[in-house]
Amino acid sequence: MSAASRRTLLAGLRLTSLRLRLVVVFALVALTAAVSASGIAYWLNREAVLTRTQDAALKDFRQEMQSRAATLPMHPTQAELQAVAAQMAAGGSPGYSVLLVDERAAGKPIAGTSDIDTLTLDDVPQELQDAVNRRQKVTDANEFPYHLYWVRVNPRGKPLLVAGTKVIGGGPTGYMVTSLEQERDDLNSLAWSLAIATALALLGSALLAQAAATTVLKPVQRLGDAARRLGEGKLDTRLRVSGTDELADLSRTFNKTAESLEKKVADMSAREESSRRFVADMSHELRTPLTAITAVAEVLEDEADNLDPMIAPAVHLVVSETRRLNDLVENLMEVTRFDAGTARLVLDDVDVADQVTACIDARAWLDAVDLDAERGIMARLDPRRLDVILANLIGNALKHGGSPVRVSVRTVGHELVIEVRDHGPGIPEDVLPHVFDRFYKASASRPRSEGSGLGLSIAMENAHIHGGDITAANSADGGAVFVLRLPLDVSRSADGEENDGVREGEECEEQ
């Protein structure tokens, strides 16, 4: 699987991805629409089915009561009531039962039913009996012409339609019970059908959403890839524009932005290259007169004791400033090499303790530095550049923190760790993030100092070219702490490939 395919798959799987959100929104809209439509369809069909069955049953019952129950004698017997009830049930739909009750019988009312084993007066809801007998009329019992009342009940999970009425002009009270199970089964089948239709609609909407998301997000993905390449420095990246929609306008805007950015970066690069070349050329041009001035200044320094006491301070000042100017030119040339990418490592296997000792001894710092370094720690690095790093770190500590400066050397895994600690006031918190910046001054009111403002920056560049780093912090006990970390074998890069140092022939000749 290609990297682009993996990124596309991972983007689709992220919970916050635009693709997933589009699919979810489409699915929710489709689900809401399908559920609403199914619910309305189910409710309308339910009412239509129940109303049709109910109206047919009630019509039959009313007609049977008028045509058969009205023919009964004034005081019918139970057998007569039962015979008429059976005749009425035979003319109705399946599950149609009739109960006839004569309230005028002396003593206990008598009743006759088409199915005496299943239907009794107790099966008729009391509120319906009250409505039929005119003692009260309940709100959920609906009145038909000829004082016909009905109600739907669901005893023991079995849906029933129960209706009741009296014969006009006097006669028995009739009750009808018919089953609604067939209608319930039909409605359940309808509900299942609607549920399946809803599921299919949801699945279809998800597929459509996926297709729509792919269509919409493909240009967005191309735009993201182009922006990523642009961020990696490929400023010639452009998008192919087709169409006239908003995404096409966005692509055109991206192309214009990339073109403008490429032009500005090219202009800045040209100006930066011109500035680097100017600094390099100026540094080279300054070295020749500085060499002569330095030679004369050294002669004057040697003869300073024999000069007029009024002239001697001026001579010492000239010598000091000449050396400072010479250091500044050398640092500028070193910075120019780093900026131009021409700085190279000349690697060698060195004993780190001997290297640190040599750096301190060469600058007569033995009495001012407390060295804690175990001999035998071997590292493959550039000795000259390590000397530059140590000289800048230790010299900076002596300048701002005073002596003694503690230097410790140890190894941590495959890293060489050198710590330089002083006992001065430490570094102000607002200055700490800028200690490695070029020409940075802690106080704007003190633009001139003994140093060039490039020492720590050059030390950091030399650490980076080794594949290492330098960090600065304040100690809890007071003072500043600089920690240098370098790989023990610089010739090995992070991926294990050999990285041989290249001797800087021209650089060595110039120095």
Image (spheres, rainbow, N blue to C red):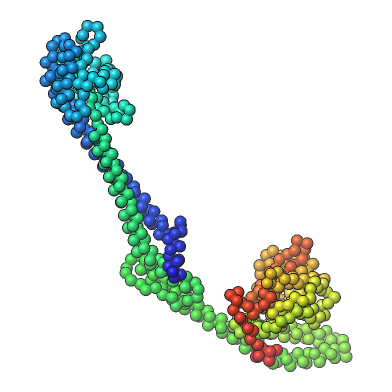
- Rendering quarter of residue 131: top left
The image quadrant where one finds the N terminus is: bottom left
Q: On screen, 450 above or below 111? A: below
Of all residues, the one furthest to the top in this rendering is 106
Q: Nearer the viewer, residue 30 or 316?
A: 30
241 vs 468, left or right, is left
Q: What residue appears at the point 29 percent right and 41 percent down from the top-left corner? A: 191
314 vs 495, left or right, is right
Q: Is residue 362 visible?
A: yes
Q: On screen, 316 above or below 134? A: below
Q: What residue appears at the point 87 percent right and 88 percent down from the top-left corner? A: 305
- Rendering quarter of residue 410: bottom right
Position of residue 180 measured from the top left corner of the image (x, y, whole percent): 24, 31
Q: What residue appears at the point 76 percent right and 90 percent down from the top-left corner? A: 294
Q: Is residue 308 visible?
A: no
Position of residue 124 measured from the top left corner of the image (x, y, whole percent): 27, 21
Q: Nearer the viewer, residue 315 or 97?
A: 97
Position of residue 348 measured from the top left corner of the image (x, y, whole percent): 70, 83
The image quadrant where one finds the C terminus is: bottom right
Position of residue 259 measured from the top left corner of the image (x, y, whole percent): 43, 76
Q: What residue appears at the point 15 percent right and 22 percent down from the top-left corner? A: 88
- Rendering quarter of residue 436: bottom right
